[in-house]
Amino acid sequence: MRSIHSPLAAAILFTGITAVTSPPLIGDPQTMQSAPTEASLVAGPLRMKFADGELRYITVGDKEIVRRIYFSLRDPRWDTVASEFQRVDIQRKADSFRIEIKALVRRDPVNFQWEGEIVGTSSGRITYNVRGQAGADFRFNRFGLCVHYGAASLAGQEIELIDAAGKVSPSLFPARIQSELWSARFHTLRYTTSGGMAVSTTLSPEAFGMEDQRNFGDSSFKAFSGMNFPYPRITAGGHGEQTLTLEVKNAKPATAAATKTVVVEVGTPLANAKVPRFLPLDATAKKGFFNDLNKGKEQFKDAEVLAWPYCSAVNLFDDDTQFENLATIADQAATARAISRSARLRIAPVSFHIPYPRTTADPRDQTAFAAAWTAAAIKQLALAGVDEAMFDLAPGPGRRMLDELGAYSGSPILTEPGVPSHSPVEAFAVQSKESVVLWVVNTSPAPASANVRLPGHTAAAQQCGDRSSRNVSVRGGSLPVVLQGYDVCRVTVGSRIY
């Protein structure tokens, strides 16, 4: 998916890949990223996406083993200062790759030049080396390589943490959201899947810390590190280096990537899944994070309403992050239900706006992105059993989508369609008195398609984006839906399907 980037030009060199460029989305060059680069990569049994200097969605077959690996610098305000990529050289083979990066992290007073080398081998091993030097004195809060482990894939997975002395400490990726940092400092995290695949990530020379990022709206567990600079200040000329190694053993060999047709089937109502009630945004909307509620469990156990804010852009703000993080709403709601079984759950506000300390308005609010994000967020709110929500949306496509779906508040959600992992297509359906309405959402700027199964029907009404509604034929119980970038298509049939 396309990332936000600044209008600052960057000289980007490619080997075996075409540059992906687009006009700037946010007009603050001090917080945004230069022209993005994307590529699909293979390292033996591993498949992944490279975007904006990051490795994302590292999978073996249908199993995501690591969500992201990337270099990050957090300034004294805890803001992530994005890199300006001056050179990205990608060399790919059928089962391996090599990437060289030259980048600058720059926002007054932050000034850090870094170079990266990422190598993926046919044996299923990835190394990410980063080395750099400060061009000025500046303060920082975090500074180094990070690894995200996706909660949807790994919650409940037993793991081992290994420290510098070789001591092994058993642990677990928790199902419920943990309010505190894990105390162990470790160099290696390893785990073995139920199928016997062994996965390990090792950092050298520093150690990792770990936190449950779901407290802050992210859908992952985050291992973070600090380069060898005296905290919290770096002096001009100071330099550091880190290497992260990901290794997989006992994995099945990679097969050619299959084209997965997204098939959407509408079924019966899901228990406790209804379109929530949408409240006007007002002064009762909270600031802060879910962690504020999670840390105060005892004081909230008898509350009539459990309320907390949700933002999908607290730590990172590229489009991939904005959509992948929405799954965290379900984890937050389940953790809140464990605090109080009887309380109403209210998320206020729900937002994709980049929060403090960034103050520039997010112009995605005025694009089709906002409608797609709002529809996908409402799906997650409904599936999570959230009762009420306030959205922070400016007048525009997102607000119109909210108004449209608000007409169905209280309507049951029908069986969630089966969609391949990391597919750009989201879908959900509601049952009203007169009809079944299905929303098919493209969370990508690239065209996408789905095959909607409507057994027993020969016709439907379809409307995509702001285009006019039209009647379409359903042949053989199937309706193909073609979506433009960030499209939301509505398919309506005039009676119950189940």
Image (tube, helix red, strand yellow):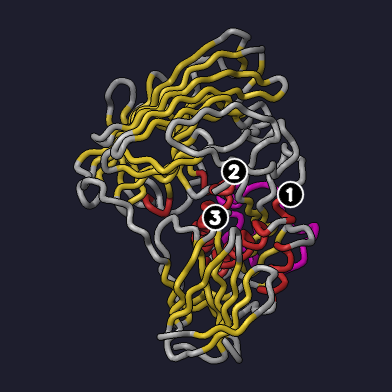
Q: Which residue is drawn at 68% across and 45% down?
A: 354
**Distance of mark 1 from mark 3, alpha carbons?**
19 Å
User: Within the magenta stretch, is there residue 163?
Assistant: no
Front residue of 308 and 99: 99
Which amino acid, mark 1? Pro
Front: mark 3 or 2: 3
Image quadrant containing the C terminus: bottom left
Q: Residue at x 20, y 47 (%)?
A: 196
User: Within the magenta stretch, is there residue 306?
Assistant: yes
69 relative to 232, above or below:
below
Front residue of 380 and 261: 261
- Label 1, on which residue? 363
360 relative to 242, above or below:
below
119 relative to 494, above or below:
above
Quick check: can you spot residue 160? no
Q: Which mark is residue 3?
A: 2
Q: Does residue 2 appear to the left or right of 365 in the view shown?
A: left
Q: Which mark is residue 446?
A: 3
**Where is residue 213 drawn, in percent x and y?**
51, 44
100 relative to 93, above or below:
above
Q: Residues within 10 Å of mark 3 (few under 14, many from 20)?
A: some
Quick check: can you spot residue 219? yes
**Where is residue 490 drawn, in percent x and y?**
60, 75
Q: Residues within 10 Å of mark 2 (few under 14, many from 20)?
A: many
Which residue is most to the top?
Answer: 237
Which amino acid, mark 3? Ala
**Where is residue 97 drawn, in percent x and y?**
35, 32
Query: Which region shows up in magenta?
Result: 278-307
SS category of the residue bearing label 1: helix
Q: Which residue is drawn at 24% across and 41% down?
A: 198
